[in-house]
Image (spheres, grey):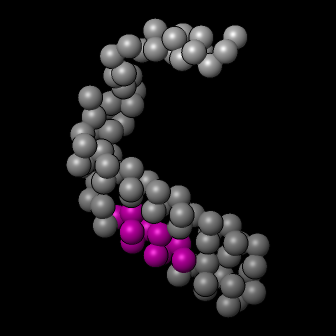
Amino acid sequence: MDASDVKNKVDKINPEQKEGPVATAIENQTAKIPSDVYLWAALGSMAVSATLKIIKKDEEALFVGQWAPSFLLLGVYNKLVKLQGND
């Protein structure tokens, strides 16, 4: 099986390239959330992480600090859904 066979099979699965009902419902609900929420959540997780680091709770600080990129990525996704919409 070569690349063109794989592409042909994938093109037949969803030829109209539409989102499913679950993704559409999630996008409709999350588009209602202001983009600032994700930014503040990321900044809040960094502040909590710094606080935990100061009080010598290093493992907890790392755990909470790793939330920031996820919040920012969710914010980017949210903004794209708002600007581009869903199908």
Image quadrant for the C terminus? top left
> In percent of the image, x 39 and y 69: which residue is there?
39
Task: Please indicate whether residue 55 sits to the left or right of residue 34 in the image.
Answer: right
Image quadrant for the N terminus? top right
Q: Where is 47 relative to 13, above or below?
A: below
Query: Which stretch did the figure color magenta?
Result: 37-46
**Residue 8 x/y as whole percent:** 51, 11
**Residue 69 x/y as whole percent:** 54, 64
Task: Please indicate whether residue 83 sits to the left or right of residue 57 in the image.
Answer: left
Q: Where is 70 relative to 36, above or below?
A: above
Question: Farthest bottom residue?
Answer: 54
Q: Main secondary structure of the magenta part?
A: helix
Q: Where is 40 relative to 29, above or below?
A: below
Tell whether position 86 is magenta.
no
**Residue 23 x/y as whole percent:** 39, 31
> In percent of the image, x 46 and y 75: which residue is there?
43
> In percent of the image, x 46 and y 14: which residue is there?
11
**Residue 32 x/y as whole percent:** 24, 49
The answer to whether one can see residue 78 in this image is: yes
The answer to whether one can see residue 29 in this image is: no
> In percent of the image, x 31 and y 67: which residue is there?
36
Q: How many marks?
A: 0
Tell whether position 40 is magenta.
yes
Q: Where, by quadrant of the figure, is residue 34 drawn?
A: bottom left
